[in-house]
């Protein structure tokens, strides 16, 4: 009997400690939210959290039946649209001709505007490539050096042929090495051989940001002096 009584006491003790913590839910009066209060009897602690209930789903309201005036208005609107479309169809040839004329006019205008746009784009591209006036001035000076070098090379070859024919009545390439050396010496005395050398054109190898305005002007003056020298050599 004592063992049975002790067993009952053990079961009662276990049940006391295995009770599910109590939960209390109550809505707030401010925004309709619920506060969940959980009391844990085992350690006498309280946990609180707030949840927001989902909104109550709204039932789909059936459409209100149309009234007689509304139906009459819908019928009148339909008949008016039918009359308008019929009148348009009766004038289909005239309307199509007007549309064709307008379509052609708009197409021609678009072609004209497209051409103007292309021309403007070409002009803009040219301006972008040109850069500033200073950049153009430097580019011209570099080209002038190359052009005068090319002219000097042509002048040097011309004088070799001219002196060869004047003195020996033969092409420079037909002369013996000794006679060719004589003609070349005579042409070199004109002082134009230096203008044919790559060292004459120095500006093209210099970056634009390293070139001063005075350098460009000096280069162009050098080129102008070379033109006079070449012209004098050609007159001999």
Image (cartoon, rainbow, N blue to C red):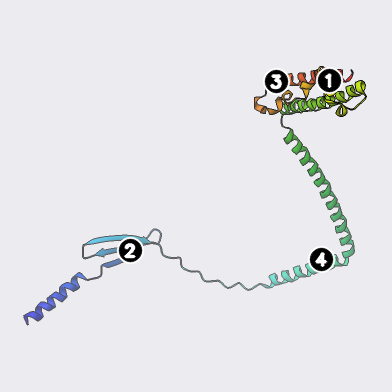
Decide which of 193, 58 is in the foreground and name it.
193
Q: Is residue 101 visible?
A: yes
**Badge 2 or badge 3: first in the primary sequence:** 2
Residue 84: numbered disc: 4
**Badge 2 or badge 1: first in the primary sequence:** 2
SS for callout 2: strand
Residue 28 lies, in percent from the top left, at: 36, 61
Q: Which residue is mark 3?
A: 215
**Residue placed at 76% from the left, 19% from the top?**
222
Decide which of 24, 170 is in the foreground and name it.
170
Decide which of 44, 205 is in the foreground and name it.
205
Q: Which residue is mark 1?
A: 182
Residue 166 occupies which quadrant of the picture? top right
Q: Would you call the spot at circle 2 few (<14 residues within 10 Å), some (14-19), or many (20 or more)?
A: some
Residue 195 occupies which quadrant of the picture? top right
Label 3, label 1: how far apart the Cα atoms are: 38 Å
Residue 141: numbered disc: none
């Amino acid at each position: 009997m004592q063992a049975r009584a002790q067993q009952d006491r053990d079961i009662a003790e276990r049940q006391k400690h295995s009770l599910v913590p109590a939960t209390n839910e109550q809505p707030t009066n401010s925004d309709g939210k619920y506060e969940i209060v959980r009391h844990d009897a085992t350690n006498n602690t309280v946990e609180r959290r707030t949840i927001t209930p989902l909104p109550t789903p709204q039932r789909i309201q059936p459409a209100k039946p149309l009234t007689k005036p509304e139906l009459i208005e819908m019928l009148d609107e339909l008949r008016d649209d039918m009359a308008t479309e019929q009148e348009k169809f009766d004038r289909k040839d005239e309307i199509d001709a007007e549309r064709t004329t307008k379509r052609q006019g708009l197409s021609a205008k678009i072609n004209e505007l497209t051409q103007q746009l292309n021309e403007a784009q070409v002009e803009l591209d040219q301006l972008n490539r040109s850069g500033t006036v200073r950049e153009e001035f430097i580019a011209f000076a570099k080209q002038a050096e190359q052009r005068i070098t090319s002219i000097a090379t042509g002048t040097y070859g011309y004088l070799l042929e001219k002196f060869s024919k004047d003195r020996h009545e033969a092409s420079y390439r037909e002369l013996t090495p000794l006679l060719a050396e004589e003609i070349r010496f005579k042409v070199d005395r004109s002082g134009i051989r230096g203008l044919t050398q790559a060292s004459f054109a120095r500006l093209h190898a210099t970056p634009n940001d390293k070139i001063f305005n005075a350098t460009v002007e000096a280069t162009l003056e050098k080129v102008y002096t070379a033109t006079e020298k070449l012209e004098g050599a050609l007159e001999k």
